[in-house]
Every structure is written in C-alpha cells, then in structure tokens.
Amino acid sequence: MHSVTPTPAGVIEADAVIIGAGPVGLFQVFELGLLEIKAHVIDSLHAVGGQCVELYPDKPIYDIPAVPSCTGQELTDNLLKQIAPFEPTFHLGQEVTIVERREDGRFNVETSTGTRFLAKTIFIAAGVGSFQARTLKVDGIEQFENSQLFYRVKDPALFEGKNLVICGGGDSALDWALNFVGKAESVVLVHRREDFRAAPASVAKMKALCEQYEMQLIIGQATGFESRDGKLTELKVTGADGVTRRVPLDMLLVFFGLSPKLGPIAEWGLDIERRQLKVQSTEKFETNVPGIFAVGDINTYPGKKKLILSGFHEAALAAFGAAPYIFPDKKIHMQYTTTSPKLHKVLGVETPVFD
C-alpha cells in the first residue's frame, strides 16, 4: 500500500493531460470523456486546432468520414462542439518542458509558464512537434520581422494595396500569391528554381497571371536588401545568371515551409525513431513509458499512416488503454453512444424512446 503524499499547493491533479490541441488531441478529449475521464489540454500555440488551423484554416479537407468537405477551422470548431459536454480545461500558449515519472506511477508535468500538474496519464498528440518557420537567411533582415517581413498571414487585410514580394515555391507561397493578385498593388513571386512543389493547377494559374502582367515571377534567391529610415525598401534577388536585381517592396512574405522540432519531448526517456515516438502496440498506443500514450502524427508503428482518420482511431484505443491507470478497480465495458443511457447522460442528451 502506497502512502499518499499530499499534492503541493498550486499543482493541478489530473487524470489525463493531453499535449497538443490539434484535431487528434481534441478527439482524445472526447474518447476519454466517454469513459468519464476529464482532460487537461496543453498547447504551445495560443489557439486550438494545431497545424490544421495554423497552416490551412481555409483549405478544404476531404477525408474526414461522413464529412465530404470541411476546412481545418470548421473541423476544429465541430470538434470543440463535440467535446463541450466534457468541459476540458485548456492551457494555451505554453509548452510542456518537464515530464517526470514518480515512484507512485504518476507524473510531474510542468510547462514553460510554470503551470504544474500531477497526472495519472499523459497523451502526446503533438503532431510532428512544435513548428517553427524556416527563416530567410539574409543578414540583418530579421529587424523587419512582424513589421514588413512575415512568415505567416494572420490578417490578410494588412497586405492589401501594398507592393508584395513573396518568396517560396510550395503551396503556401502560391496560394497567397494568387490570393493577393488584384488585392495588392503588385505581387512578385521569388523562387530559387523553375520547379515548384505546389499543386500543378496553382502553378499553371500563376504562370497565366504572369503572362497577363497581373503578377511577376523572378527565378533567383534573396541575397540582400536596401532600407531607408529604418524601413525595408528593396529586396536584392540574385538569379542563376549571377545578375542581382533590386525589387522594390512594401511587404515581404516568406514561405519556406515549417521545420518541426520535437523540443523537450526528446528528453523524456521515450523511444524515438526518426523524430517520432515508437508505440509498444497498436492495441493501446502506449509508449515505452507506462502511462504515456502517443497518438496522431507524432507516433510510429509498422503500417502507420499519417491521416487525421488514423489519429482518431488511435485516440479511441488509447483511452481504453489508459482507463486501468485511472480506474484500477473498475471493469471498463465497451458502450455505444447510440444506445447507452449512461453515455447519453455523460453527453447531456436525452435517451430516445422507441415505440
């Protein structure tokens, strides 16, 4: 029999801590809620939705079962509605920095803002880790960040009527270039080579707009800049021919992709294979540390497919895998939301009466 150590003041006791508030982390709340397990959700971003909302809030997703098409934002909004009955607690804008297993099998968890938890189980649904934008490697240009140099678009209205230079050759660069044609004063796309990583239809549309003089494409790399009175005025772009052109601008958008970083997760004693967390089995998606589960894009196992759909399935089985840690003396029975009066009560819905 363990002696019970009192929980220190200011420490939150939690049955389950979920790291990551993307779609899979949110659905993990639902699956735990059905088993009457309350969750605390932590995310380094300041809003829920993970990379779905960060990277493509307005782009359609077509492979969510029974939802022919929805955007990343719509998917997030619907998941939030679905989990509302379980009243999860969100801790946003903070990164989990410390995870320590205690002698009693529980975990000390601490975040970058000093929030502390005593958790029975942990679910890592951190996608591919925390994202950081790949930056433009031009000496001194960082001084214009968030005033004239941007690595993401939060408020499109900010760029309307401006002379824009957009660097990159992937979907984000092309999507925003096409979006701003007709809204910005001018749009110049800068890419280091003739080949693009973006959708072929977007590339074709961009080239057609260049032929109509609606926008411009320059093949080359940003190598320097000019400024006046503390403001960025021109970007120097060096082409394959060795010639450096000066491109006047008001705003510079750079989309070189995002670099995923495992961050502190790498220090928690978990088995890692190519920056992903290995799970012991596909029965419950538990890591090599008992009580820590990994679901969604962060995990790896034979046959793994990086689909939101797969993450939802993993979340369901992980919840059942975690239940014995939370309710060691309770037999967990599989119940269906369609027919179970108990689950109807948990969900706050009425049990239908059939004649």
Image (tube, rainbow, N blue to C red):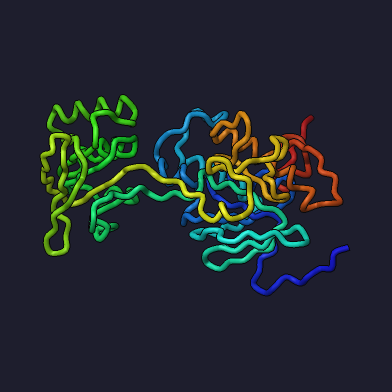
Apparent side of residue 238 relative to residue 45 in the rendered image (left or right): left
At horizontal 73% and vertical 47% (from top left) the residue drawn is 322
Q: Residue furthest front?
A: 242
Picture quarter containing residue 296? top right
At horizontal 59% and vertical 40% (from top left) the residue drawn is 299
Apparent side of residue 206 relative to residue 245 in the rendered image (left or right): right
Q: Residue furthest right?
A: 1
Residue 278: horizontal and vertical position, in percent?
Answer: 63, 41
At horizontal 79% and vertical 30% (from top left) the residue drawn is 355
Asked if residue 125 is positioned above or below residue 9 in the image, the reply reads: above
Residue 334: horizontal and vertical position, in percent?
Answer: 78, 37
> From where the camera sits, is residue 82 visible?
no
Picture quarter containing residue 91? bottom right
Q: How many numbered discs, if any? A: 0
Q: Residue furthest bottom?
A: 9
Residue 190: horizontal and vertical position, in percent?
Answer: 21, 39
Q: Nearer the viewer, residue 240 or 256?
A: 240
Apparent side of residue 153 relative to residue 300 in the rendered image (left or right): left
Q: Nearer the viewer, residue 109 or 273?
A: 273
Q: Nearer the viewer, residue 15 or 157?
A: 15
> From where the camera sits, is residue 74 visible?
yes
Picture quarter containing residue 219? top left
At horizontal 62% and vertical 66% (from top left) the residue drawn is 116
Residue 335: horizontal and vertical position, in percent?
Answer: 77, 38
Q: Name the quarter where the N terminus is drawn.
A: bottom right
Q: Nearer the viewer, residue 92 or 283?
A: 283
